[in-house]
Structures are given as C-alpha cells and as structure tokens.
Image (cartoon, rainbow, N blue to C red):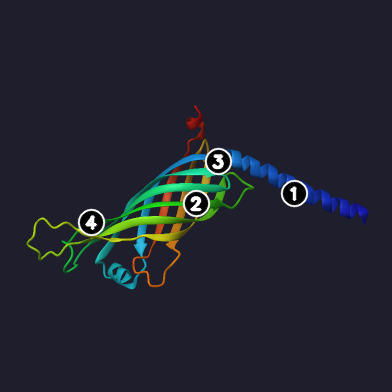
C-alpha cells in the first residue's frame, strides 16, 4: 500500500513539474510583441440586415484587419483596426446601385491563452471594447451636391474567442470570432470573423 501511495505521489508531483516545465517553455516561445494582418468581415445581427442579405440588397465583401498584440503569456493585450465592406443594390432611398460602404472599427482588449502544454496550438478567449461606424448613405433624390454620407456608430463591449497556430520563427495563423456582450435592445450589434497572419517580433525587437 505504501508503494502505491508513493507511486501516486511521484506521478502527481512529476505531472506538476512537467506542467510547469511546459508552461515556461510555452511562455518563452510565445511572449513578446506580435503584429498581425489579415481578412475580416462584420455581419450585423438585427433581422432587417439579415433580410437584406437574403434578398441580395446587401452583399458582403472581404475587408481587412491589422493590429498589434503584446503577449505576456498566458495573457495578451491588443489594439487593432478593421475595415469591413458591403455592396448595396436596389435600395430605394439611400444609395446608388453598386455603392460600397465601409464598417470601420478600432478595438482594444485582452485575451487569455488556454493550452500551456504546447507552444504550437493555442485556443484563447477574451474581451474587448470597440468603437466604430458604418456609412448609411444619403438620399438619392436630394439636389444638394454638398451632402456627405452619414454614419451609424457601432460602439460595444464584445467577447472574443479563437485559435492561434504557430509554425516556428515567430510566424503563425490566427482565427477569431467576436460578438457583443449585450444583444437585447442593441440594433447595431454585429459579429465579426477575422483570419490573420501573425508575426512575433521579439527577436527583431531585441536587436
């Protein structure tokens, strides 16, 4: 019986040491300043927007995202910019056919990486504050040539979840989904998908 207890203790203690060792390796590998750039698309969640997508009044087009993430593993702190695009057709009052409108967002937030046992695959969750606006066009019947398109503000707190994959030498890929914390009585709520190429610049930074 004593031998069994000793073996269980050694297995538990060894697992803790191994976990600590893996954590330190992962921390050394992934910590540092990370630049990212990629494709992004926002999609508003109110029923009218969904209806316009279904009847092809609105067509989503790929946009882009760019930003900076400072990782102090297991935490990451980021600031980013997104420009998502939509094309409008057959909308009676606000747009000429084929007009492209932009949804522009700046966001700041943090995330927590969840898999310290490996430095190659890292699921993450987090939260962010984002401030943005989407153009809503002008009345086509207006004779005032000096009118400029107006916009709707899309400011919100969001939850973030995603997966990062690393290939070595600081290079990786990241996929992320965002959605607002508050959905009820929030007609400007939107979700967002981002796929990015990432580069950990710590070696360049330290030169």
Which residue is nearer to you in this view: 207 or 92?
Answer: 207
Q: Which of marks 1 and 3 is nearer the N terminus?
A: 1
Q: Earlier in the sequence, mark 4 or mark 3?
A: 3
Residue where numbered disc 1 is placed = 15
Question: Mark 3, mark 2: which one is toward the viewer?
Answer: 2
Question: Mark 4, mark 3: which one is toward the viewer?
Answer: 3
Question: Mark 2, mark 4: which one is toward the viewer?
Answer: 2
Q: Which of marks 3 and 2 is nearer the N terminus?
A: 3
Residue where numbered disc 3 is placed = 31
SS label for mark 3 = loop
- In the rendered view, tell whether residue 25 sits above or below residue 149: above
Q: Earlier in the sequence, mark 2 or mark 4?
A: 4
Labelled disc at residue 110 = 2
The answer to whether the residue labelled 1 contacts the one labelled 3, judged by CB atoms less than 8 Å apart, is no
Return the residue found at the far left. 143
The span from disc 4 to disc 3 (Cα, nearest Å) is: 39 Å
Label tally: 4
- In the rendered view, tell whether residue 93 sits above or below residue 28: below
Question: Mark 1, mark 3: which one is toward the viewer?
Answer: 3
Residue where numbered disc 4 is placed = 100
């Amino acid at each position: 019986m004593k031998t069994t207890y000793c073996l269980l203790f050694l297995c538990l203690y060894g697992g803790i040491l191994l976990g600590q060792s893996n954590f330190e390796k992962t921390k050394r590998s992934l910590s540092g300043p990370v630049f990212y750039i990629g494709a992004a698309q926002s999609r508003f969640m109110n029923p009218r927007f969904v209806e316009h997508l279904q009847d092809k009044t609105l067509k989503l087009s790929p946009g882009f995202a760019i930003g900076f993430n400072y990782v102090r593993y297991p935490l990451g702190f980021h600031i980013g910019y997104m420009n998502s695009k939509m094309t409008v057709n057959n909308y009676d009052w606000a747009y000429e056919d084929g007009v492209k409108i932009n949804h522009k967002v700046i966001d700041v937030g943090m995330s927590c990486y969840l898999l310290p046992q490996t430095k190659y695959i890292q699921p993450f969750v987090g939260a962010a504050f984002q401030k943005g606006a989407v153009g809503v066009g002008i009345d086509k019947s207006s004779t005032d040539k000096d009118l400029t398109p107006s916009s709707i503000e899309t400011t919100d707190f969001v939850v973030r979840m995603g997966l990062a994959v690393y290939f070595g030498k600081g290079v990786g890929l990241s996929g992320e989904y965002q959605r607002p914390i508050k959905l009820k009585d929030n007609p400007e709520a939107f979700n967002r998908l981002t796929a990015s190429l990432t580069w950990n610049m710590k070696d360049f930074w330290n030169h």
